[in-house]
Image (tube, helix red, strand yellow):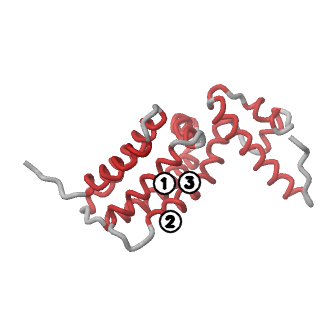
Amino acid sequence: MPRIHADNVAEHVAQQRAALIGSAVALFGERGYHNVSLAQVASSVGLARNSVYRYVPDKAHLLVEWFREAAPRARDSWSEALAGQEPASERLGRWAETYLDWARTSEHQLVGPLTDELDSLDEQTRAEVADLHRSMFEVVEGAVSDAGIPSGEVSGVVELLSGLVLGAARAESGGARARVLRPRLRAAVAAVLAEPTVG
């Protein structure tokens, strides 16, 4: 990677930090989080391993730094998908496909390692990650409420919809045809939101 040039030290540090996180995300996505060492990430941006500690205390915090950027991006794209005056089921169908597109990326595969690493993080950082995750799904909860789901059931319905999306992502990755699977996903979203028949 070419040397980073900046007008001042603060800008240089910011650029190095961004390069480090970007390279880590790329390497983790390409090789898998557990198959990449901190030294390899450092080397990819022309840093000595010890220099990485100026930016993050350990490899897990590279995931945290990534999520600090990824969660707001996801929330924005989800908010855009959920916007409009159409029925909530239609808007949530758009959200489901938007989420599915992200879930199919190598970047989204970092959610698993981040979850696995939570216990190694300090309490404040764990709380921050939880807040970021919650902020993403708040916009979905709003749309689910718009669909007439009782307040006590909203979080469970959101979990169910999220599970449908992640299942669809696995199916598409396994070879399921999107032109068949995605209409089924939308139909499943609508079915979840429909008033259940209790026997």
Which of 113/53 is in front?
113
Looking at the picture, how far across and down is residue 82, in whole percent?
Answer: 43, 64
Looking at the picture, how far across and down is residue 48, in whole percent?
Answer: 85, 34
Q: Residue at x 58, y 48 (%)?
A: 125
Q: What secondary structure is marked by label 1?
A: helix
Residue marked by disc 2: 80
Numbered disc in front, either 3 or 1: 1
In the rendered image, which quarter is residue 147 located in? Answer: bottom left
Looking at the picture, how far across and down is residue 78, in whole percent?
Answer: 49, 59
Side of 31 where 168 appears, left or right: left
Q: What secondary structure is marked by label 2?
A: helix
Q: Is residue 156 visible?
A: no
Q: Which mark is residue 98?
A: 1
Q: Which mark is residue 74?
A: none
User: How many neighbours does mark 3 have within 10 angstroms: few (below 14), some (14-19), or many (20 or more)?
Assistant: some
User: How many neighbours does mark 2 have within 10 angstroms: few (below 14), some (14-19), or many (20 or more)?
Assistant: some
Q: Is residue 168 visible?
A: yes
Label 3 and label 1: CA atoms lie apart by 14 Å
Of label 2 and label 1, which has the lower sequence position? 2
User: How many neighbours does mark 1 have within 10 angstroms: few (below 14), some (14-19), or many (20 or more)?
Assistant: some
Looking at the picture, how far across and down is residue 173, in whole percent?
Answer: 48, 35
Q: Residue furthest bottom?
A: 85
Contact between labelled residues 1 and 2, with CB atoms less than 8 Å apart? yes
In the rendered image, which quarter is residue 35 located in? Answer: top right
Of label 3 and label 1, which has the lower sequence position? 3
